[in-house]
Image (cartoon, rainbow, N blue to C red):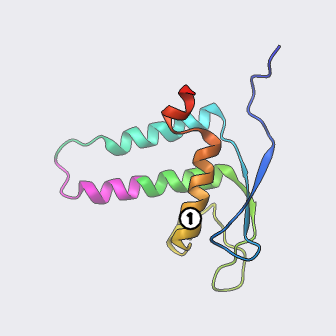
Amino acid sequence: MPKGTVSLETERKELKTAPPDGFVLLKRMSYGQTVERRSMLTLGFESDGNSNDFKGEMSMGNKRITAYEFSHCIVDHNLDGDDGQKMDLNKVEALDTLDPKIGQEIEKYIGEMNNFNEEDQKN
């Protein structure tokens, strides 16, 4: 019978935006985590029409979704903050200091691993 549980295997991704040796070790989200992420996205797009700052609310929603993905998918990395300590990418506050190029590269790898694009799922 085919295995129906999420793989516990990790994938090491070399970070081109964090030379010379930057890396991130990623794992897939479970289906339940993917559903939770999707519900966060859906809730972020709903509005009662009374919001004065819908754009700001969407930005905060996207930040929460990214923090959720990072906390569930990043197993390990070797990125340090300005203080020389390893960054805690499980905390939403880390996103405020993370280099945007590095963050976008990690986000891209997480998306590729979890097939968030419906077109990819059709193929």
Looking at the rendering, the stretch of residues picked out in magenta corresponds to 50-61
Which of the two residues, 89 or 121, is positioned nearer the viewer here? Answer: 121
User: Is residue 101 shown left or right of residue 58?
Assistant: right
Please, what is the three-letter code of the amino acid marked with disc 1?
Gly
Which of the two residues, 112 or 58, is positioned nearer the viewer here? Answer: 112
Tell me, yes or no, if residue 9 can be seen here.
yes
Question: In the rendered view, would you say 69 is above or below 8?
Answer: below
Asked whether 57 falls inside the magenta stretch, the response is yes
- Label 1 residue SS: helix
What secondary structure is the stretch in magenta mostly built from? helix
Q: Give the quarter of the image for residue 48.
A: top left
Question: In the rendered view, would you say 78 is above or below 68?
Answer: below
**Mark 1 surroundings within 10 Å by alpha-carbon count, few (fewer than 14), some (14 through 19), many (20 or more):** some
How many marks overall? 1
Quarter of the image with the C terminus in it: top right
Quarter of the image with the N terminus in it: top right
Q: Seen from this angle, which residue lies furthest bottom?
A: 83
**Picture residue at 49% right of the left edge, 50% below the top:** 65
**Picture residue at 61% right of the left edge, 55% below the top:** 70
Q: Seen from this angle, which residue lies furthest top?
A: 1
Q: Position of residue 95 (x, y in %)?
A: 53, 67
**Picture residue at 39% right of the left edge, 58% below the top:** 60
Q: Seen from this angle, which residue lies furthest front?
A: 123
Asked whether 110 falls inside the magenta stretch, the response is no
Question: In the rendered view, would you say 75 is above or below 78?
Answer: above
